[in-house]
């Protein structure tokens, strides 16, 4: 429950922080900030993601005690890459001060993006270690510290120094400070380094993680390419509209998915350690049903409350384009969530991650074709359609690869069908309320949607959620079942 609490806190504060920064910077500067943030995420993915993924796959409480060289290999690799990125940030900052002489130049923005990427990478790694230990309290403390520091530092930077570079730097520093505050409980017991083991672990991490980061980098290139295309064709302000809609939409759909993935994938890894690969794949199949049963109503509910959300919480300068872009992006971001939290774990458990790259390349190609064909007919909104088409194509290809062949995954098809029917019933109940006064619409839609969907889940025990909830909040279940 601490992990779920951490993600509720993270989602809420990130949502508030994103809107606050967007309001304080304005559409044009927020568009530049969003473009630099996308670049920072790409840099983090290329440099650090293979290590974070390796931490979630190979580090555990048992490994911490019996195979300490796994953590040593992760730490050493992180230190080397972090120092290289910090040096690059310093070089860009020095050149920016001497050549451009401004905090708004490209080199200064690159330095800020590098600091942000460094902070993201270090924080995500230590958060993954806490989750791999199933230490919910430590994870909650880390997330709380990061969010509070980010709210103060990023909000303060946007208020006092309303330039993207300072907000980017504050984003990185806030995450580094959170790790520094909790470094002692996050550390393992120091032991002598076995260099032969280090080389073996680095080889293992690269073979496992590099295909995944290649795919993730391709997916991160999509928003970077799309935002750059909008900025080039329609200006930074339009890129700001697009970026805010994308950020709010992906967080609204993906936040719960990320929380579930942190629990469910680690559970599958533990099942594999205790019962073998076949049992782990059965657990992954069960996890797919849970992910769909949770995220499908989230996506539909977000579409229903979109007009009310825009009217009540979106800064006035972004209204209109926000709802138009977000409505077109919802299917694509739902597909992305399915890839990340339902389909990718299949190949991660099998340690055969090359199909993930093939799906990502297809998605980028479809997105590129869409950028060429759609904007002449639909304007800037055609870029949102291109992104949705690319993510949908990638999901379809990966699903085909996972669900066909001799090793196809045996999905709980009844649970998927039931989740779809329950979501449709919930949506039909809420659609008549969609165009009410925004305050009334939001006040009615949220509780009514939860009651309708939760009632159907309870009656039909969709994806076993009724049993999971009763086991957690009803009579105490055995420790192993928890």
Image: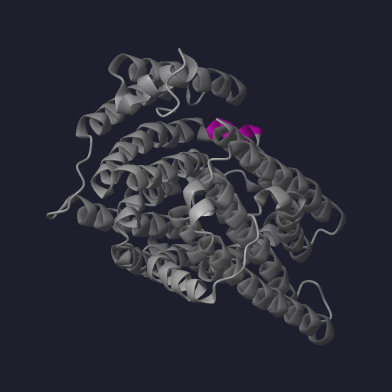
Where residue 58 sits: x, y (%)? 44, 56
> Closer to the camera, 477 or 462?
477
Q: Is residue 165 magenta?
A: no
Please tell me which residue is depicted at 49% across the width and 58% down the height of the picture.
67
Report if residue 226 is visible in the image: no
Quarter-of-image position of residue 425 = top left
Q: Quadrant of the image for the C terminus? A: top left
Picture colour scheme? one colour
Quarter-of-image position of residue 299 = top left
Question: In the displayed structure, does residue 315 sit left or right of residue 340?
Answer: right
Please tell me which residue is depicted at 61% across the width and 62% down the height of the picture.
121
Q: Is residue 308 magenta?
A: yes
In magenta, the rendered stretch is 307-312
Where residue 410 sits: x, y (%)? 19, 42
Q: Residue furthest bottom?
A: 99
Where residue 429 sits: x, y (%)? 39, 19
Question: In the displayed structure, does residue 337 sit left or right of residue 408?
Answer: right
């Amino acid at each position: 429950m601490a992990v779920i609490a951490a993600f509720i806190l993270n989602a809420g504060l990130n949502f508030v922080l994103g809107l606050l920064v967007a309001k304080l910077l304005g559409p044009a500067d927020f568009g530049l900030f969003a473009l630099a943030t996308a670049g920072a995420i790409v840099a983090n993915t290329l440099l650090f993601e293979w290590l974070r993924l390796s931490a979630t796959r190979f580090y555990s409480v048992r490994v911490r005690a019996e195979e300490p060289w796994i953590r040593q290999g992760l730490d050493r690799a992180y230190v080397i890459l972090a120092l290289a990125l910090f040096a690059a940030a310093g070089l860009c900052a020095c050149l920016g001060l001497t050549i451009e002489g401004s905090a708004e130049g490209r080199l200064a923005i690159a330095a800020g993006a590098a600091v942000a990427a460094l902070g993201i990478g270090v924080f995500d790694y230590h958060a993954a270690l806490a989750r791999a230990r199933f230490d919910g309290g430590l994870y909650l403390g880390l997330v709380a510290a990061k969010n509070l520091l980010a709210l103060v530092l990023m909000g303060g930077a946007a208020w006092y120094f309303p330039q993207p570079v300072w907000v980017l730097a504050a984003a990185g520093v806030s995450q580094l400070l959170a790790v520094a505050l909790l470094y002692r409980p996050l550390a393992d017991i120091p032991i002598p380094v076995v260099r032969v083991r280090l080389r073996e672990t680095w080889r293992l991490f690269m073979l496992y993680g590099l295909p995944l980061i290649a795919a993730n980098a391709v997916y991160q290139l999509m928003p970077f390419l799309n935002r750059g295309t909008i900025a080039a064709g329609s200006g930074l302000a339009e890129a700001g509209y697009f970026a805010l809609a994308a950020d709010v939409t992906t967080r609204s759909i993906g936040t719960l998915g990320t929380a579930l993935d942190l629990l469910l994938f680690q559970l599958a890894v533990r099942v594999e350690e205790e019962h073998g690969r076949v049992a782990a794949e059965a657990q992954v199949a069960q996890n797919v049903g849970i992910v769909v049963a949770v995220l499908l109503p989230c996506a539909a509910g977000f579409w229903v409350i979109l007009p009310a959300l825009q009217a009540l919480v979106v800064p006035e300068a972004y209204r209109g384009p926000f709802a138009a872009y977000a409505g077109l992006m919802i299917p694509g971001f739902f597909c992305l969530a399915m890839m990340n939290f339902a389909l990718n774990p299949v190949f991660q458990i099998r340690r055969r991650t090359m199909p993930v790259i093939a799906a990502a390349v297809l998605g980028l190609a479809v997105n590129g074709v869409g950028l060429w064909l759609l904007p002449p007919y639909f304007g800037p909104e055609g870029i949102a359609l291109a992104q949705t088409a690319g993510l949908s194509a990638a999901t379809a290809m990966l699903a085909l690869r996972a669900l066909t062949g001799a090793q196809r995954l045996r999905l709980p098809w009844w649970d998927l069908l039931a989740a779809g029917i329950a979501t449709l019933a919930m949506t039909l109940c809420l659609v008549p309320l969609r165009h009410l006064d925004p305050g009334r619409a939001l006040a009615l839609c949220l509780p009514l949607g939860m009651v309708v969907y939760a009632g159907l889940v309870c009656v039909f025990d969709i994806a076993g959620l009724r049993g999971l909830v009763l086991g957690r909040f009803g009579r105490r279940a055995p420790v192993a079942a928890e």
